[in-house]
């Protein structure tokens, strides 16, 4: 049962344009959401997060939007750069009492073209 | 710089042997670490939660006798794949929390190939 889904396995965007990566979740107990960037054979690198009490968080070129009623979040990258090409994972978490464990989506491969 | 170090980055072993993977938090103490596994073109799947000083908590479907986890100190957790088989070949990644609800910091992963 995939509780976090990224329905687009790949996305191609022209340099300078906006990249929008989408993520849906089913578990209403999730209260913290994160986006990670991953290169092959490396661990994920944290990009940006959002708490369920917010609907938007912005950090430089990266903005995450959360729509709790729709159980949907998205990552916007503006402007997109070739170095952004990677696999992006969304992840969701809820506090377990000791630490938050993450449930990952299946990933979206972003290709930023010149 | 890296805050979680994982070693080795890749390992090839023969079927039937055991392999140990180390995960260290470099500048913070982690009472909890997590072990994930990723198959090619698939998501990272949580295998187990490693708790310092107590038994690990395994996710459903993960064999605890096959994937031995030891979290003997606040900066080190180890995953031992016992009697490895080719189907255990995968990319194993550890992570650690600096504080609750902080972004998890990941190691660079270990590519295990069992021949």
Image (cartoon, rainbow, N blue to C red):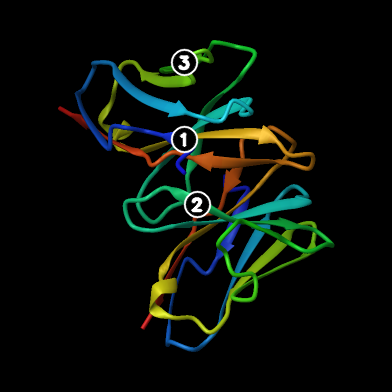
> In screen coordinates, is A87 left or right of A93?
left
Q: Residues within 10 Å of mark 3 (few under 14, many from 20)?
A: few
x 41%, y 27%: residue:
A23
Chain where mark 3 sits: A
x 39%, y 56%: residue:
A41
Between residue B52 and residue B26, name the one nearer to us. Answer: B52
The reply to whether residue A24 is in sight is yes
Q: Residue furthest right?
A: B53
Chain where mark 2 sits: B
**Mark 2–mark 1 contact, CB under 8 Å?**
no
Q: Quadrant of residue A96?
A: top right
Whether residue A75 is situated above or below residue B74 in the rendered picture:
above
Name the residue carrying label 3: A70
Name the residue carrying label 2: B45
Between residue B14 and residue B74, name the one nearer to us. Answer: B14
x 38%, y 58%: residue:
B39
**Mark 2–mark 3 contact, CB under 8 Å?**
no
Q: Residue furthest left?
A: A114
Name the residue carrying label 1: A4
Q: Quadrant of residue B54?
A: bottom right
Mark closer to the chain start, 1 or 3: 1
Percent across and percent down for residue A59 are 50, 17
Percent across and percent down for residue B47 are 57, 58
Question: Which element is circle 1 on?
Answer: strand
């Amino acid at each position: 049962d995939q509780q976090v889904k990224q329905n687009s396995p790949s996305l191609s965007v022209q340099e300078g344009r906006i990249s929008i990566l989408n993520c849906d979740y089913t578990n209403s107990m999730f209260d913290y959401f994160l986006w990670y960037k991953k290169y092959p054979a490396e661990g994920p690198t944290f990009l940006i997060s959002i708490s369920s009490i917010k609907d938007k968080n912005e950090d430089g070129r990266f903005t995450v939007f959360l729509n709790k009623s729709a159980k949907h979040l998205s990552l916007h990258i503006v402007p997109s750069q070739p170095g952004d090409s990677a696999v992006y994972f969304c992840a969701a978490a809820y506090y377990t009492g000791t630490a938050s464990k993450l449930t990952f989506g299946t990933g979206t491969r972003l290709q930023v073209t010149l | 710089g890296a805050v979680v170090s994982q070693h080795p980055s890749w390992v090839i072993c023969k079927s039937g042997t055991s392999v140990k993977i180390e995960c260290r938090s470099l500048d913070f103490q982690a009472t909890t670490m997590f072990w994930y596994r990723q198959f090619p073109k698939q998501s990272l799947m949580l295998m187990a939660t490693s708790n310092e000083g107590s038994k690990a908590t395994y996710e459903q479907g993960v064999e605890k006798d096959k994937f031995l986890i030891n979290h003997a100190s606040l900066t080190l957790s180890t995953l031992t794949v016992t009697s490895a088989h080719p189907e255990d070949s995968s990319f194993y990644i550890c992570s650690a929390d600096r504080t609750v609800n902080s972004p998890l910091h990941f190691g660079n992963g270990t590519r295990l190939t069992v021949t």
